[in-house]
Amino acid sequence: MSGSMYLLTICLPLATLLLIFGMRYFSAIQQAKLRFANDEAYRQLAERAVAGQMEAATALASIEASLSDLKTRVGTIEKVLQEVG
């Protein structure tokens, strides 16, 4: 066997192993990047949900204040009508 053929038979399997492990780690890195992007999307979605809940709570407090004011006014009107009638 010639020297170049000997080196070729030794280097090709080693290069194949290196290529396989390189592709494996590249795949793991890509999956980690995608997982991080997915987690970031969920984090943004959660932040938007919290902001929406806070807006809804503010609106609900405003509605409750208006309703309380209306109850007071209606109570006053009922007292006036009872006094007149």
Image (cartoon, rainbow, N blue to C red):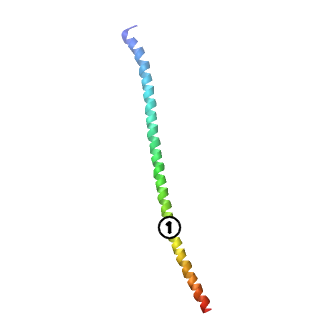
| Secondary element at image label 1 | helix
Query: In the current view of this chain or complex, which residue is farthest to the bottom?
Result: 84
Q: Is residue 52 above or below residue 21?
A: below
Label 1 crowd bin: few (<14), some (14–19), many (20+), radius 10 Å? few
Residue type marked 1: Ala
Q: Nearer the viewer, residue 21 or 16?
A: 21
- Judge from the rendering whether residue 71 lies leftward or rightward of residue 14; answer left or right: right
Q: How many numbered marks have been drawn onto this rendered protein structure?
A: 1
The quadrant where residue 11 appears: top left
Residue under the point 59% across and 86% down: 79
Counting from the top left corner in percent of width and height, residue 26 is at 43, 33
Counting from the top left corner in percent of width and height, residue 5 is at 39, 12
Counting from the top left corner in percent of width and height, residue 22 is at 42, 28
Residue marked by disc 1: 59
Counting from the top left corner in percent of width and height, residue 17 is at 44, 23
Q: Is residue 21 above or below residue 30?
A: above
Q: Is residue 85 above or below residue 66?
A: below
Residue under the point 52% across and 67% down: 60
Q: Is residue 3 above or below residue 20?
A: above
Query: In the current view of this chain or complex, which residue is farthest to the top?
Result: 1
Residue under the point 51% across and 73% down: 65
Residue under the point 47% across and 42% down: 35
Quadrant of the image containing the C terminus: bottom right
Quadrant of the image containing the N terminus: top left
The quadrant where residue 6 appears: top left
